[in-house]
């Protein structure tokens, strides 16, 4: 079984077999000495997957171009810097309310996105900042929402837990534990309903944590998905703690990929973005071809506490966090993989990290420039626009805050 102390999860320590490019194939783009798309490497993924009730499995190798691998690194490092920035802005009281950070789990969202198409549907929990980024959102869009400004993904009215972008087929951001899963099952139903006969279906994925895995609504949704043979992916991001409770204490069955009973499942090394990409390519192909739903368990880890109000060190010790950072960090894995494949050296990677840090800070400054929502916009988009129009009046039964008595009026 995978666990957080396991340091040799497949490709984490393996060398790449590189198709060495000639010097003539190289060009300089965006701060890296890049090669043309013919520059590829094959990576060994043996040991990255465990399957349940299915005769096939993902490939034990994956071929990547330099551009693809550099793209993974850029997205994951942007996620990491953005979440660290959120930590700092929260402590500066520029972000208020709940705030759940994703650092440590970047390989999961990045790998899923790399295997998905834009038309596939994605819904997740309230740990959603980096999923919006993976789906094509901007750092300024994320931070503006956290600041409560109009440039945010839900115009500053949703906050940290309620991101949404219909044009990107990203449906949240759900504030209630496990509530995204029945909605995700509805998205899978819609994808099947809208698919043309004989053609491959777009899939839907609902991501949730190990702490939500025993929710009754998830069992009900899984039953319907199986009955109706929906292209639905039940994805457990197992970061080993449901809030402050370890999986050994909160779940009698912690092999989450086997929780679907007769529904097939797969466990994936969620700290290895290449394993996630290949594993999710396999899952998408299985579900999209009319084989019904699948359970996926991503073995991952969060560095922060459950939320910003949780120091994250009362139920686990600092040594455990430091050990995971030093042996299984998803970003360090990508950097080491790039260097071992000969795609870039350490200095080139450091230069790119510096460039990304500057870009994140520019995006944060941009997010702060957006204004707060106007009070008369509070009830816009509550009802469907075609029924009530974009601008909607405040319902008479809702009592508004008394700003004259508000502590924050100034």
Image (tube, rainbow, N blue to C red):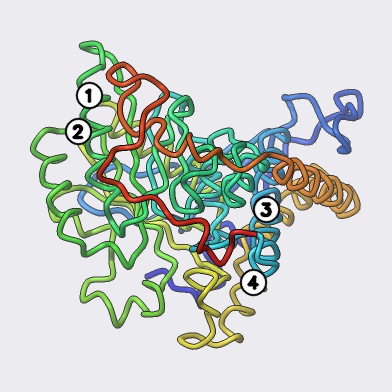
CA gap, disc 4 and disc 2: 38 Å
Residue at mark 2:
230
Q: Nearer the viewer, residue 209 or 359?
A: 359
Q: Residue 185's quadrant in the figure?
A: top left
Secondary structure beneath dot 2 equals loop
- Residue contact between numbered discs 4 and 3, judged by CB atoms under 8 Å: no
Give the residue number, with chain letter if any, for mark 1: 192
Q: Position of residue 225 (x, y in %)?
A: 16, 39
- Residue designated by label 4: 325
x, y percentage for residue 296?
A: 33, 51
Q: Nearer the viewer, mark 3 or mark 2?
A: 3
Dots 2 and 1: beta carbons under 8 Å?
Answer: yes
Q: Is residue 232 left or right of residue 273?
A: left
Residue at numbered disc 3: 82
Q: Residue furthest front?
A: 404
Question: For mark 4, does the 10 Å Cα neighbourhood hold few (<14), some (14 to 19), or many (20 or more) residues?
Answer: some
Query: Could you tell which of marks 1 and 3 lies nearer the N-terminus?
Result: 3
């Amino acid at each position: 079984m995978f666990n957080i102390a396991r340091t040799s999860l497949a490709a984490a320590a393996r060398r790449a077999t590189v198709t060495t490019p000639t010097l003539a194939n190289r060009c300089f783009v965006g701060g890296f000495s890049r090669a043309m798309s013919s520059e590829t490497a094959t990576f060994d993924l043996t040991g990255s997957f465990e399957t349940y009730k299915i005769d096939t499995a993902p490939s034990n190798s994956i071929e990547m171009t330099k551009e693809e691998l550099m793209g993974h690194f850029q997205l994951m490092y942007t996620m990491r810097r953005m979440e660290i920035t959120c930590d700092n802005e929260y402590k500066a009281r520029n972000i208020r309310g709940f705030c759940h950070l994703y650092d440590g789990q970047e390989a999961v969202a990045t790998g899923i996105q790399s295997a998905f198409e834009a038309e596939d549907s994605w819904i997740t929990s309230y740990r959603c900042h980096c999923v919006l980024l993976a789906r094509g959102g901007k750092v300024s869009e994320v931070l503006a929402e956290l600041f409560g400004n109009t440039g945010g993904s839900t115009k500053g009215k949703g906050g940290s837990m309620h991101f949404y972008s219909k044009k990107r087929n990203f449906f949240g951001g759900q504030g209630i534990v496990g509530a995204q899963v029945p909605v995700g099952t509805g998205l899978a139903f819609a994808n099947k309903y809208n698919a043309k006969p004989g053609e491959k279906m777009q899939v839907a994925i609902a991501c949730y944590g190990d702490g939500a895995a025993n929710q009754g609504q998830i069992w009900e949704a899984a039953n319907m998905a199986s009955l109706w043979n929906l292209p639905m992916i039940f994805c457990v991001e197992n970061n080993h703690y449901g809030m402050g409770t370890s999986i050994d204490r909160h779940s009698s069955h912690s092999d989450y990929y086997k929780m679907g009973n007769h529904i097939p499942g797969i466990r994936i090394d969620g700290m290895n973005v290449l394993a996630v990409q290949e594993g999710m390519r396999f899952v998408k192909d299985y579900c999209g071809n009319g084989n019904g739903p699948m359970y996926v368990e991503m073995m991952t880890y969060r560095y922060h506490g459950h939320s910003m109000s949780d120091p994250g060190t009362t139920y686990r010790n600092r040594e455990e966090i430091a050990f995971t950072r030093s042996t299984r960090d998803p970003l360090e894995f990508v950097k080491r993989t790039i260097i071992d494949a000969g795609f870039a050296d350490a200095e080139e990677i450091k230069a790119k990290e510096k460039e990304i840090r500057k870009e994140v800070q520019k995006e944060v400054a941009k997010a702060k420039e957006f204004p707060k929502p106007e009070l008369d916009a509070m009830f816009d988009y509550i009802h469907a626009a075609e029924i009530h129009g974009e601008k909607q009046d405040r319902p008479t039964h809702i009592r508004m805050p008394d700003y004259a008595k508000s502590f924050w009026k100034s």
